[in-house]
Image (cartoon, rainbow, N blue to C red):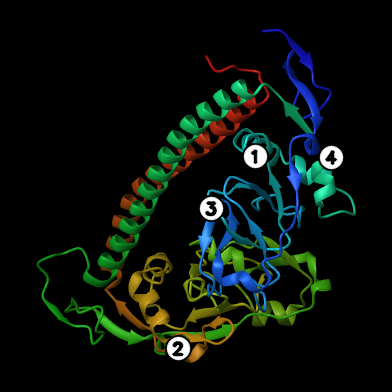
Amino acid sequence: MKMKDSGVEWIGEIPEGWEVVATKRKFKNSKEIVGNRVSEYERLSLTLNGVLKRQIDDDKGLQPENFSTYQVIYKDELVFKLIDLENVKTSRVGYSPYTGIISPVYIRLSNKNESRFGYYYFINMWHQEVFNYLGSGVRSNLNANDLLNIPYLSIPQKEQQKIADFLDSKIALIDQIIADTKRSIEELKSYKQSLITETVTKGLDPNVPMKDSGVEWIGKIPEGWENMPLRYLGQLQNGISKGGDFFGSGYPFVNYGDVYKNDIVEASGLIQSTATEQENYSVKRGDVFFTRTSETIDEVGISSVALEDIGNATFAGFLIRFRPSTNKLLPEYSKYYFTSFNVRQHFTGMMNMVIRASLGQELLKSLPVFIPTKTEQKRIVNFLDEKLKNIQEQIQYKINIISEYESYKKSLIYEYVTGKKQVK
């Protein structure tokens, strides 16, 4: 197979019989506003999982006042979201298996004979972040005219069909493996969560006498354990609030993500803070931080524990710090206890939802804490450290598998859609 230079950086070499043309040579763009015919169509949305059906009354994300300004897209057409190009992780390209209505900011291209191959061609551009590169500088959007003038590959229809059929089959298989692996990861995470919850509410000895916990969804706890509301174990403090000009330099700062993403507190940010602020909003060993506010209940009340002092650090106003005033809780035990299901159940059962979900100090103070002896806490920590290390290793192994298959999928699409490999 003889190859030639395509003259396009992201395409590279192509077979001699292939031709580079403008996209407008192969596709048409138009916008058909639905108007008063909304009830005749299903609502569609471009997602990272493709073009999916969406309920008209689905209130997640930004919502229009009405859908009369939406546009019609027909089955087998391509749809593009070429706004906010600085966000490299958002979906850009979709092949619609349905007829329906989509956002007026999307761009649709039609040519049913070309769409399946065209989808793989344009998805390869998204994988390589070409759209983002084309919109670099002061531009954060590409319009329909920009898209129609992008270089495209003109190849014989039969060859195009073979490539699309081959990729359909291969990508479906890869996507199934990825989906199965993701499901397996979620099962491991659920098992991890249930193991933590079971251990910090029932202990390690199945033969120990039990007593009523006084909490309906917990049931019984070991007889020798204490049951105390959090209010009697320490003090609560909301974090510091300062303007944006104070961030980016100065002293260590624990932000929302440092708590949300880690079970052990980190301080990835910097803030210009005074000695008084560092005293009032300090981070000491044993402190437990909770996410205080978010758009969803599931993201509120997530905890992270400080296992060592972080000098001169302060923490964000979107967090609440619990500082123990007794020595009843080992910090290592707190790391597990406050991530258990019973804690989440307490928060979600009584969370305040207005525009945003929020965790108030009074709700946090009422949280029941089941306290084993120090010896039992150490045994629980050692047991969970060992068990969860193994589970986390399995999860990471599966995450790596997904990453490898994602890379393989991108490579496969690139090689076949640009003719570097041919379907036999």
Where residue 342 sits, quadrant-wise, is: bottom left
Q: Earlier in the sequence, mark 2 or mark 1?
A: 1
**Residue sitting at x 76%, y 56%:** 83
Residue 98, numbered circle: 3
Task: Give the image location of residue 217, x and y in percent.
Answer: 26, 79
- The reply to whether residue 61 is in sight is no
Q: Give the CA separation, mark 4 to mark 1.
A: 17 Å
**Residue sitting at x 66%, y 36%:** 118
Q: Give the CA separation, mark 1 to mark 3.
A: 19 Å
Label 1 sits on what residue type? Answer: Ile
Label 2 sits on what residue type? Answer: Leu
Q: Give the CA separation, mark 2 to mark 1.
A: 47 Å
Residue 123, numbered circle: 1
* Label 2 Cα crowd, 10 Å radius (few <14 / some 14-19 / many 20+): some
Look at the picture and state if 198 lies above or below 147: below
Left/right of residue 360 with respect to residue 145 in the rendered view: left
Q: Give the CA separation, mark 3 to mark 4.
A: 26 Å
Q: Earlier in the sequence, mark 3 or mark 2?
A: 3
Work out whether residue 177 or residue 387 is closer to the camera in this orientation and state it: 177
Which residue is tagged 4?
149
Q: Earlier in the sequence, mark 1 or mark 3?
A: 3
